[in-house]
Amino acid sequence: MNKHTPVLYNQVIDELSDTNLTKIIDATAGQGGYLKTLLADKSKKILAIDIDPLQIKRLKEIYKEEHKSGRIIFQQGNFANLDKFAKKHNFYPASAVIFDLGLSWDQMISYHKGFSYKQEQDDLDMRFNSRFKYTAADLLNNLTEDQLLDVFMSFSEEPKSFDLVKEIIRVRAKKTIKKVADLNKVIAKISKKDSTYRRIYQALRIAVNNEFVNLKKGLDSALKILDLNGKILCLTFNPTEDRIVKRFIKNNNLASKTIKNKSAEANFEKIATLRVIVKTNDK
């Protein structure tokens, strides 16, 4: 497995360094970017959750000894069901919950599922779990014009969504859109900007994996099982995700602070936002 250091890694670790935070749930364990450092603190016990079965399989191999000792427990599944997993594994109440909503480069490239517009030979799949019913190609070829417009407007806020959808409808009437190269040709008719490609691929990935619905459910689940003065750390990478988190904070009258990556160089790092939420009441 390639080493993966999460964006705002030091800031997340600092927020979790308190020895009173003993039961930590990593709801998006992924490549395990936080696990080694957290496990170095003997006071902590970790529940690592990921929707991707391959990621969980890899982590189990890396942390065999810690798993045997009970210091880390693995759960493959959707973090929308986080409250059920916490109760199942005796992580109720939990001290802290991490949601890192970024995709690792390894997932984008080596899985060959069409996450990146630069991998033109890949199928347009984009499912985090192969058990999910619909692929990105299914959506592109079967959604109505209005449904496609809603996907691109709601999940990417792409200014050229209307023109793009018109072109998709025109192209798919003649040929099925199956590969990354097929979609890239459609986008190229509308825009040459990398930002447009990134937004369109982001929107399809979010739609395929029902990410925004799951995020809302996951945040609500985390609050249910969080101990008083416990923390939710949520790292987002697009404005719509962040608005969901801000709305959650406001609706539940929660204390929070915002951390940005001031020294970021890459675009995805610049837009990263870490919100540290503290449960200050027994709601």
Image: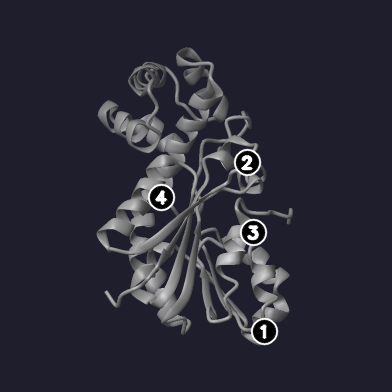
Residue type highlighted by circle 1: Lys
- Number of numbered discs overlaid on the protein picture: 4
Does 283 appear above or below 216? below
Which residue is at a point 61% across and 50% down the rendered structure image? 7
Q: Mark 4 points at which residue?
A: 211
- Secondary structure type for disc 1: helix
Mark 2–mark 1 CB contact (< 8 Å): no
Residue type highlighted by circle 2: Ala
The numbered disc on residue 3 is none
Which residue is at a point 63% across and 32% down the rendered structure image? 119
Query: What is the crowding at mark 1: few (fewer than 14 residues within 10 Å), some, or many (at least 20)?
Result: few
Q: Give coordinates of residue 243: x percent, y percent.
A: 35, 46
First of labels 1, 3 by sequence position = 3
Which residue is at a point 39% across and 30% down the rendered structure image? 141
The quadrant where residue 214 appears = bottom left
Q: Name the residue under label 1.
A: 68
- Secondary structure type for disc 4: helix
Q: Name the residue under label 2.
A: 264
Residue at the farthest top position:
189
First of labels 3, 2 by sequence position = 3
Q: Give coordinates of residue 144: x percent, y percent.
A: 28, 30
In the displayed structure image, the side of residue 13 where residue 98 appears, left or right: left
